[in-house]
Amino acid sequence: MELFWHGEKCAEVPVDPVSEEAPELNRPMTKPAYLASLASVTIDDFDKVSNQAAFEKLTKSMEVVDKSWIYTQYDSMVQTNTIKKGGMLDASVIRVKENGKALAMSADCNVRFCYVDPRNGGAAAVMEAGRNVAMSGARPLAVTDCLNYGNPENPEVMWQFGEGCLGIKEACAALTTPVIGGNVSLYNETNGVSVFPTPSIATVGLNDDQNNVLMSSFQSAGNALYLVGETKSEFGGSLYMKEICDTVAGSMPSIDYKAELALWDLVIEANKKNLLECAKDASSGGVAIALAKMVATSSLGCDVEMSVKDERDIFCESMSRAIIEVKPENCAAFEAMLDESMAVEKIGRVGGDSIKINDVEMSLERLQDNYFNTFKRVIEKDI
């Protein structure tokens, strides 16, 4: 590696010691015994609850609700480069004043995925962080990581760590988002019990136009809503299974890197053509919770009817999916960009003073109270 300053080489560093010649430490590794009993668990093993009851509970989940109580206590406008205020996008976006471009960043990790499937969970973290960046209209370029695991002297934890690294490697290669830095935090345990594998991934991407940042909340009543990506009854490691079934188990949703890249390309290219109003990926809590966040943050309702095999699939967490808002006059042009192999459904439109998704309904006022005030109530109760 050569470093230059104003055209003059000021340093030369051999890279082999940290790449091809890096020392290898082969600790004992054993596949965790707990995994054998998890894969066969499904939501059908538990008492069924109505979608309405599930929605009521999930909109109050600590993983869902707004956390602005924390980040509004410091100055987010230092150097006045923040393009949109906190909570308005799934990715943080800052402008580069010198060239009119913008950098988008997102950090993510579903620890439940990593618990039920350490390897694919690591890959899913790369996909989710990149997807959030792409939903802002930026092209994901590279990642950094913070690999948080338990005691590596425990062979089962070391196996989780090794599998997580392999999953990250696989996803980064498939999505062309190389790891350009990172750190490792081990020995995270209490009384001999390790934390869930938590390989946090932060992705950075580039938007060529700081004035064309795509939002993740609704923009105008009357706009059409599309669901891009295939919905399957996949609940392993999901928020639904955690909150409604009180367990973390099951088989992780399937991974398709080709579908993931196709989704990124669609949103990024359609945004360049100014065909989109907003885009938000469906991840934790599925389509229902993604729509709930879009409604809460925009103060605009929606009326949605999505096709499902099981009525609970509105909460499933199939990967590589996004909800996209398009003006009626742009629908034809947007649909013309869709690939024949891409699963797409026009699911409804923006508007009204409530959220309606299949058999679920909630007033805008109540949803916003759940979303914006729940975290504050919990935190200030202990102050």
Image (spheres, grey):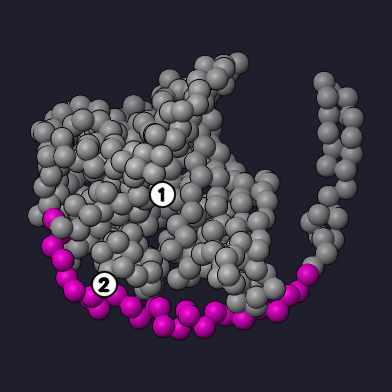
Query: Is residue 273 inside the magenta stretch?
Result: no
Q: Position of residue 285 (x, y in %)?
A: 30, 54
- Disc 2 secondary structure class: helix
Mark 1 crowdedness (10 Å alpha carbons): few <14, some 14-19, many ≥20 = some
Residue positioned 33% across, 35% down in the render: 216
Can you identify the residue that label 2 sits on?
43
Q: Which mark is residue 262?
A: 1
- Residue type at numbered disc 1: Ala
**Camera-side residue: 198 or 310?**
198
For the stretch drawn in magenta, the main secondary structure is loop
Q: Position of residue 340 (x, y in %)?
A: 30, 52
Residue positioned 51% across, 45% down in the render: 107
Residue 349 visible from this viewpoint: no
Residue positioned 56% across, 57% down in the render: 199
The quadrant of the rendering that contains the N terminus is top right
In 3D space, how far apart are the residues under numbered discs 2 and 1 (Cα atoms)? 30 Å
Q: Position of residue 191 (x, y in %)?
A: 58, 70
Residue 250 in which image quadrant: bottom left
- Residue type at numbered disc 2: Ile
**Is residue 145 placed above or below 243 in the rendered structure?**
above
Query: Is residue 32 inside the magenta stretch?
Result: yes
**Camera-side residue: 14 or 372?**
372
Choose the circle earlier in sequence order: 2 or 1.
2
The quadrant of the rendering that contains the C terminus is top left
Tell me whether the residue at label 2 lies in contact with that at label 1, contact meaning CB atoms closer than 8 angstroms. no
**Is residue 215 placed above or below 95 in the rendered structure?**
below
**Is residue 342 placed above or below 331 in the rendered structure?**
below
- Where are the magenta residues, as a range? 25-52
